Image (cartoon, rainbow, N blue to C red):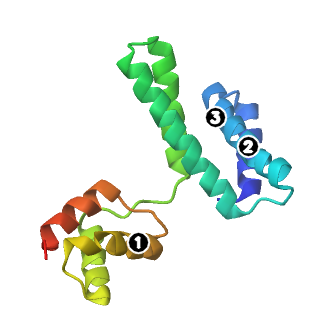
Amino acid sequence: MDYQKLLDDIKAAMKAQDKPRLAILRQWHTEVKNIEVDERRSVTSEDVTAMLRRLLKQTRETLDGSIRANNDQQRTETLTTQVSILESYLPRQVQGDELDALIGQVLAGLGTTAKKDMGKVMGALSAKTGGNFDKPEAAAILSTRLTDN
């Protein structure tokens, strides 16, 4: 994710008076700016994406807590909207048949069939997809393909 795109999207949200989008984008921007201040360096696209993932995880956890606590309906709806906004900035995740085929390639490339090597397979899969794959689905596929040896 490009830092300039984040800034442009904040401006667009301000013009459109889209309060939920503006709030979450500003929060994301603050996280990114903290890198510049704390580490005294310019941010990279990787930093912007890492902060996106971190903020998305935090917002999902807050949403789950809000749902479990039966909090205000408006707050829950806002958090749900913010999660979908953040998810829209993530690259498409590999899943389904495409993930199954990719796992087959990784297993063939590593030449492994043992469950003890599941971490290596997940690491190679992560490197191949940039971490953009459905991890629980990948684990389920791997558990059927790998043996206990």
Q: Is residue 62 above or below residue 138?
A: above
- Separation of marks 3 and 1 at Cα, in angstroms: 30 Å
Q: Nearer the viewer, mark 2 or mark 1?
A: 1
N-term-proximal mark, 2 vs 3: 3
Residue found 49% across the figure and 14% down from its top = 74
Quarter of image, res 146? bottom left
Q: Quadrant of the C terminus?
A: bottom left
Q: Is residue 80 visible?
A: no
Disc 2: which residue: 29
127 vs 15, nearest the viewer: 127
| Residue 35 x/y as whole percent | 77, 51
| Residue 26 x/y as whole percent | 72, 36
Say which amino acid is labelled 3. Ile
Neighbour tally class for label 3: few under 14, some 14-19, many 20 plus, Cα within 10 Å: many
Say which amino acid is labelled 2. His
Tell me the element at label 1: helix
Neighbour tally class for label 1: few under 14, some 14-19, many 20 plus, Cα within 10 Å: some
| Circle on res. 24 | 3
Disc 1: which residue: 123
Q: Is residue 99 above or below residue 63?
A: below
Q: Are marks 3 and 1 in contact (CB under 8 Å)?
A: no
Left or right: 16 as drawn, with respect to 95: right
Q: Nearer the viewer, mark 3 or mark 1?
A: 1
Q: Are marks 2 and 3 in contact (CB under 8 Å)?
A: no
| Residue 83 x/y as whole percent | 50, 37
N-term-proximal mark, 3 vs 1: 3
Q: Are marks 2 and 1 in contact (CB under 8 Å)?
A: no
Neighbour tally class for label 2: few under 14, some 14-19, many 20 plus, Cα within 10 Å: some
| Residue 10 x/y as whole percent | 73, 40
Residue found 38% across the figure and 73% down from its top = 125
Q: Is residue 4 above or below residue 108?
A: above
Left or right: 46 as drawn, with respect to 11: left
